[in-house]
Amino acid sequence: MAKPNYSFEKRQREIAKKKKQDEKDARKREARNAAKPAEPEPPASPSPEAPATSTTPAPPGPRVHRRVS
């Protein structure tokens, strides 16, 4: 008599569980998108009153690790 392949069965259960979770996430995403009102797109160019500044933050300084005695 052949012995059962538990690894294969476990993998199949994991695949089924992931598929079910993906379907659930897709339904949630559709519900969220349907409930969200259509928002107008923000203007592509900045308004003339706003100053032209860089939105990228300055890089952090070097990290210094010190021992605590």
Image (cartoon, grey):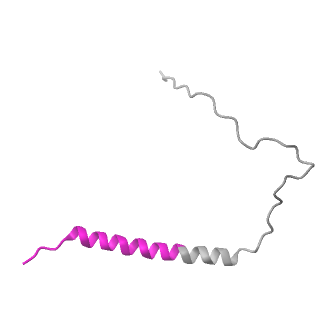
Indicate the position of residue 22 as horizontal and vertical percent values. Answer: 48, 72
In the displayed image of the protein, which residue is found farthest to the left? Answer: 1
In the displayed image of the protein, which residue is found farthest to the right? Answer: 49
Indicate the position of residue 29 as horizontal and vertical percent values. Answer: 59, 73
In the displayed image of the protein, which residue is found farthest to the top? Answer: 69
Q: Nearer the viewer, residue 25 or 68?
A: 25
At x 51%, y 76%, the residue is 24
State which quarter of the image contains the N terminus: bottom left
* Number of numbered labels in the structure image: 0
Snapshot quadrant of residue 39: bottom right
Say if 38 sits above or below 58 in the image.
below
Indicate the position of residue 63 as horizontal and vertical percent values. Answer: 56, 28
Is residue 50 left or right of 66 when viewed as pictured?
Answer: right
Assess whether residue 6 is covered by the magenta stretch: yes
Is residue 69 left or right of 36 when viewed as pictured?
Answer: left
Say if 69 sits above or below 16 in the image.
above
At x 70%, y 39%, the residue is 57
Say if 51 sits above or below 43 in the image.
above
Is residue 15 left or right of 69 when viewed as pictured?
Answer: left
Secondary structure predominantly adopted by residues drawn in magenta = helix
Residue range of the region highlighted in magenta in the rendering: 1-25
Assess whether residue 31 is covered by the magenta stretch: no
At x 25%, y 73%, the residue is 9
At x 23%, y 67%, the residue is 7
